[in-house]
Image (cartoon, grey):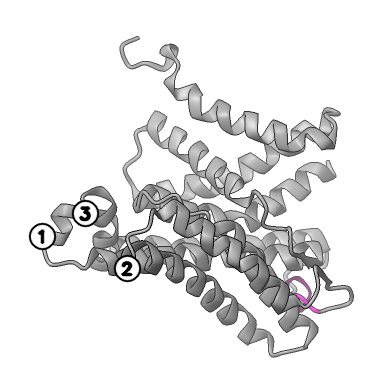
Amino acid sequence: MSFYLTALLQGLCFAGVALGIFISMKIFKIPDITTDGSYTLGGAVTAVMLTHKLPFGLILPAVLLAGAAAGAITGFIHTRFKINALLAGILVMYGLFSVNLEIMGRSDLPLINTPSIFTILLISNNADVNTFWILSLFVLTITVLIGYLLKTDFGLAMRATGDSETMIRALGVNTDKMKIIGLALANALTAVSGYLMSQLQGFADINMGIGIVIIGLGSVIIAETLIGWLQITSVWLSLALVLAGAVIFQLVLAFTLDIGVDANLLKLVTALFVLAIVILPRLNFFSKQL
């Protein structure tokens, strides 16, 4: 059962990554690989500030600013120099590896006996229950804020930029600025996942972000599949399904380990699972003609 509890908690931690991928790939149609670097950046900034005993209230804002800066740089390179968004993200992600090493000063930074958000906030005396409720409230707050943003005029302009860039530009909207802000927001959310995960697992590691974009992408694809099957148009329900996708993704991996699959094959199983949820809706027996 511990597999599933861990999967649930990790799924909640990865909600920020899933929301970030949703914004970059589903709203702006930009494949942003900066995610791998900004996730580690969030964890690195968190670990360094915690170990230096800096005021806890400053850590989350610092993480958000760091992640937003990484995304904004990708957006600037893409829009200002007309470099392919995928390449721009790869370049920034690659550069962030060195930045994260410089921030931590080493390849990994343990947080043993260091206060965390899960120890300074007490909702329940049971550590696991306490962690669950803190993560749930944290994720719920972020989701409500993002949902509200997407319903505002600014959020509608963001969504229109991804749907029809030419049209929204003709209406006087600076689409390059929208893309930079969108990627900054997406990577700020991703950095928040690093902030949560480093505290949950008790350390930050330079390699913790490798392949993290696959987890976010898998979560969004699960949500997209459910949105298509259920024909959902509500922004709020779409965001809720993105969160559900993050948890489902982790539960599937937990089930894989629980039935005895070698942990060395976990990344292969992850790749096959993402492939399956991509092609499943395209199979003939899901056609509306039946």
Residue under label 2: 80
Residue under label 1: 170
Return the x and y of residue 82 as percentages of the image width and height. 32, 60
Q: Residue at 33% of width from left, 17% of height from top?
A: 288
Comparing labels 3 and 2, the label whose residue is closer to the camera: 2
Q: State which tag comes first along the sequence, 3 or 2.
A: 2
Return the x and y of residue 134 as percentages of the image width and height. 67, 66
The boundaries of the magenta stretch are 115-120
Q: Residue at 59% of width from left, 76% of height from top?
A: 63
Q: Is residue 130 visible?
A: no
Are discs 1 and 3 less than 8 Å apart at CB? no
Amino acid type shown at disc 3: Glu
Dominant SS in magenta: helix
Question: Is the residue marked by circle 3 packed among few (<14), some (14-19), or many (20+) residues within 10 Å?
Answer: some
Residue under label 3: 165
Amino acid type shown at disc 1: Ala
Q: State which tag comes first along the sequence, 1 or 3.
A: 3
Are discs 2 and 1 less than 8 Å apart at CB? no
